[in-house]
Image (cartoon, rainbow, N blue to C red):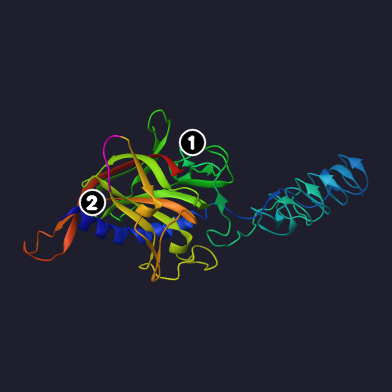
Amino acid sequence: MNTKLSQNLIIGLSLAALAGWAACAAEKVGGGTPGTAGTIGTGVAGTTGSGTGVAGTTGAGTGVAGTTGSGTGVAGTTGSGTGVAGTTGTGVAGTTGSGTGVAGTTGSGTGVAGTTGSGTGTGGAAGAAVVQKLCATKTTLMNPVLVNFETYTGTVTADMFAAPFGGATAGTGNAYTGPYSYGDGSVTPTLAILAGRPPSNWAVSQTATAAHTWGMGGGIWMNCADASTYKGITFWVRGSGPLNVFNVSLNMENTSMPDAANAAGGGTCTGTTDTCKPATKSDLPLTADWTQVSILWADFTAGMNGTTTVIPNGNDVTGIGWTVPLKFQLDPTVPADAAGPYIAVMGDLVINIDDVSFIP
């Protein structure tokens, strides 16, 4: 079976999964407003008290080291007033609450390190995440580097790594990006950050052993970006597979489906999993040596939004994906001149990616 037929089969099997994964991954960064852990009341570590006292037990007013009381306190347990670190309140990472709090538990009034309280707090525990479309917030790039993995410190696994982008220099900015991986159901690929293209310290690596359904896929999720002032994307790659080729996809908001759990989020494609397709570039060579690949926007095969073709221009980009395919052969149980079916030949797959940038 020729390479092109293999790739057509692989793209059909994998792009829908890739587009859905990237739409979800692109929303990894977000949420409410942090609060600061308050409990109830105003007082500094007091037990029960009103009045002014230091380490008093009962009293009214302002107390230090009191447990129950009213007034202003720090680290009080029960009380009213403004608290920081309350549990119930409004914010990001808040749990329940009224008022504004950062990592607080419940609180009213002013309190620092209080347990229960209401009012203004910092860091509430359960703030509801804002559901919005992928490109409701969009970054206009100040430099072309998307990710070079040089901010990796080895303290997290590859799937949890995220790097800032969009700022004046590489590895800075208010938007984030990182790698992801998925398999074909026959094997789970290994995603890692290993030695990069010299002199780079790090690159993302994906491997799969004995895959036998269609291959493996992965990519770079990212907050939505306007890269329309650039000409395309470029990166360095090395790897291997039965066909020694790989495919690249460019995910955009309008080729991604809405979030399955809440249509207010995700992409804006009005089609189905079969008709919401990213722009693609197929049959790129995959060799054992680091090789630079550059793809202009015009080099991509157009994506689909339902029945409408989507020609990429660098705007509303939400991710870059890849697939590494297996070789397919005619099923040996059917006659040699049969039209099919074709089945995958088991194989090992490797791809390493480094220095992903937009082309000035």
Expressed as whole percent of the image width and height from the top left, the position of residue 299 reads 35, 53
Q: Is residue 287 magenta?
A: yes
Magenta segment boundaries in residue numbering: 284-289
Q: Nearer the viewer, residue 338 or 345?
A: 338
How would you rate the neighbour count of disc 1 (Cα within 10 Å): few for under 14, some for 14-19, many for 20 or more? some
Task: Tell me if I can see residue 256 in this picture.
Answer: no
Residue at screen point 69% across, 53% down: 124
The secondary structure that most of the magenta stretch takes on is loop
Q: Is residue 298 above or below residue 194?
A: below
Q: Identify which amino acid the numbered label 1 is placed on.
A: Tyr
Q: Earlier in the sequence, mark 2 or mark 1?
A: 1
185 relative position to 126: left or right: left
User: What's the distance in space between the residues labelled 2 and 1, CA to CA?
Assistant: 31 Å
Expressed as whole percent of the image width and height from the top left, the position of residue 346 reads 20, 50
Q: Is residue 224 magenta?
A: no
Q: Which mark is residue 195?
A: none
Residue for badge 2: 326
Quarter holding the N terminus? bottom left
Residue at screen point 45% across, 41% down: 157
SS at mark 2? Answer: loop
Quarter residue 164 falls in: top right
Q: Which mark is residue 152?
A: 1
Quarter residue 197 falls in: top left
Expressed as whole percent of the image width and height from the top left, the position of residue 254 reads 46, 63
